Image: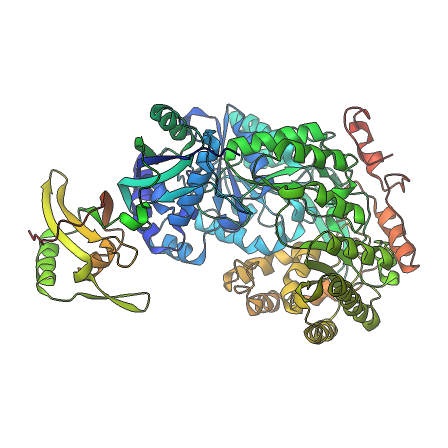
Amino acid sequence: MDELQKSTIDSRLESILFQVEKPGRYVGGEHNQVRKPWDSVETHVALVFPDIYDLGQPNLGLAILYDILNRQPDILAERAFAPWVDMEAQLRENALPLFSLESKTPLNRFDILGFTLPYEQIYTNVLNILDLSGIPLLARERGPEHPLIIAGGQACYNPEPMADFIDAFAIGEGEELILDITKAYQTWKRSSTSRQTLLENLASIPGVYVPSLYEVAYNPDGTISSVSSRNPGAALPVQKRIVGKLPRATSRFLVPNVETVHDRISVEIMRGCTRGCRFCHAGMVNRPVREREPEEILEAVQAGLDATGYEQVGLLSLSSSDHTRILELIRGVYEKFKDTRVQVNLPSLRIASFSVDLMDELKDLRPGGGFTLAPEAATERMRAIINKPLDEEIILETARTIFEHGWLSLKLYFMIGLPQETMEDVQAILDLARKIKGIGKSMKGNRVRIHLGIATFIPKPHTPFQWYSIEDAQSLQAKIDLLKDGTRKSDIKMTYNPPDSTLLESWLSRGDRRLGPVILQAWKNGAKLDAWTERFNLPAWLKAFETCGVDPDFYTRRQRGLDEILPWDHISTGVSKRFLLTDLRLSLAGKTREDCRNTCYNCGILDAYGSLKPSEEEVYWGCP
Amino acid sequence: MTNAQPIRVRVRFAKDGDLRFTGHLDLQRLFERALRRSGLPLRYSQGFNPKVRLNLASALPLGFSSEAELLDFWLDEALETAEIQQRLSAALPADIQIRQVEFVPNQLPSLQSSLRTSEYRVSFKPAVETRVIKEKLSQLLLQDNIPFTRRAKTVDLRQLLLSACWRETSAGDELVLEMKSTPEASGRPDELLNLLGLEPGTYQVCRTALIFSADKVEIIDG
């Protein structure tokens, strides 16, 4: 690379860093960072998490891809994050492009920029980062001199709103896909053919979605009339990629030199969930369930701790207590680490006394603080609708066990705005919280603290609730007011999202390609870092919708027709639309479908991925 | 748990490069983790939430480099200092270099409480006219008080500055400052340089010594 430019960056950076808050965010140099000489490899990938370092660096997906790519001798992967507003101002003022942390190379010099999109509120940051890097925002305006822009992550199961900006999406699990994409890039680069050829080659890789190779047509009422492929290699639908067996867990975590939101190592103990909660995007799109063996997890934890010096471990999954060998795992963790000062986090525990026993097995390795339960709904009727069946007595019994075992603080998560929800269902949240508080008080006195976390339901793509509208702000506000009033009177702490703040997530998660111009205009209006409550700029978005002549309510305040082509229908998670529809009907009838690990309801996963299922001895799959 | 007397280890280290932008609390965490990675037999604090016992002499302001930082930590058993140095160095980022490792008596007071002053070396970007700075500094030093607002409080830099002298080097003029470094009163070179009209980023500050007895008080100006 051009050495002159590099030294210019270094010297300008030197003075900039004194002007910004927390400059350690921008310099890299962490323990376990990988540095390779630029010219020693064929392909240069920048992994970009489009929010600030403090949030992005602990992301497990980023750590996994960084590890996988850097193990390749002919590839280097460096990292980049969104700058905070002060740093952005300095970069623009000093005419500096955004650069990677490792070698401080401007992003436009990389071959591939891989954006992680775990949630929708970071879309404008992607535009801002491209702009700061001098890369055209629109995919169609990029030429051979520009990097290939790819994106992956949980938000990409509906890639359409970002279709104008991303050259190719990686749909599903990235462990194998990222290498397929880089190999295809290398082959193309050696061939010196056009960028269009590269896109077509990428589209032929299973799990890659190249939006420019698809045509979307609309009905007069604005709904989609058809989605068609314009290239024989571009599959319809694009089916997500998965790995049959989770690869060896990453242990080479970077150790940040400045504080981040999670200073710990993370080991995924299981991927997917068999519970089938109807509101749950993660539970639907991450099927099937695949476990890691306790032996492998213990080894990964040990290796991660040795490599980092951290004293905190997160054992991650969507439903930890459902791991078939969880007790054995937790006992193993205790035995192995009891003489150390390691703290073990075991989030996402099911509501059952068994979960409390599990935490107890960790003894002094368990972190301080409260216990968390997520009943999500407070009436049995509502829990049947969302398919989280649970007797109230079990909730109370679990709470009792929690207090009995010495916890004094309990956090309860609920949703409001769920389908068919009435004020009685909301009142029941209060009643249940009070009942639990009463139990705690009778057992432990006034030291007991109850904390209510209230989330607003957003009907997510690829779930049985995808056809629903979101509730109007006024009626949501009434529900919030009821809860606020009630919790204040009962000395219960409550946190919630104001209805306005969930609008953006609703539009972007449920949107189609016509949101591209809106996102672009919102960014031009000053929207960025939208995930930061204090920075979220609703007027910028509303004005953008207006300028573009797009009605935001079309995406959120409209029950969608069951026969409508949904914007994400051409992306397949392996779970069939027919299954989702049946599940919706069951919900309307107030019927549940319990844990599918015993009874298969034929969601489509086995049809799509059955051939990848290893033998029972090799790995536990949740599918019978 | 061992019940023997802990072994107190004192480390002198340099810090530079990108790690200049890692602040005091983060540096403490960085050492905790590096010490754990080193596999040395560390002594932990007592109590419900035991922590690696370590003690840094003095917070180095963000952006400064140093040739003379001091760290105390405690081991459960004695090892050769060379081995300690080797194992700790291997676990540290390259921007921290260990200069010396020695054992010190447990009964010595803490580093923070016995530190008196710090010596800093300031070098300037080529664009800075040191002749002008020299003049301004001489004028400033004639004042009895040099008030400076630090987090809404006024401090007198004159009381915190013990000496200032210029040194000519092949790379240009350097300013050597000795400033108070006690928990009650601590001088910051960047505050003085700010009064001389210098923006951060136009100069570099390196801490060159930590001084644990107060015997130099005269002012030398160049």
Q: Tell me: residue A376, above or below residue B205.
A: below
The answer to which image quadrant residue B34 occupies is top left
Q: How many marks?
A: 0
Give the image location of residue B46, x and y in percent.
50, 44
Q: Is any atom of residue A50 visible in this view? A: no
Give the image location of residue A8, x and y in percent.
30, 42
Q: Is residue A219 left or right of residue B61?
A: right
Q: Tell me: residue A186, above or below residue A468.
A: above
Q: Is residue A302 left or right of residue B143?
A: right
| Residue situated in front as seen by the camera: B50 or B62 | B50
At x 45%, y 44%, the residue is B29
Q: Is residue A61 left or right of residue B11?
A: right
The answer to which image quadrant residue A420 occupies is bottom right
Q: Is residue A570 left or right of residue A333?
A: right
| Residue situated in front as seen by the camera: A576 or A345 | A345
Q: Is any atom of residue B71 visible in this view? A: yes
Give the image location of residue B66, x and y in percent.
27, 42
Give the image location of residue A34, x and y in percent.
46, 31
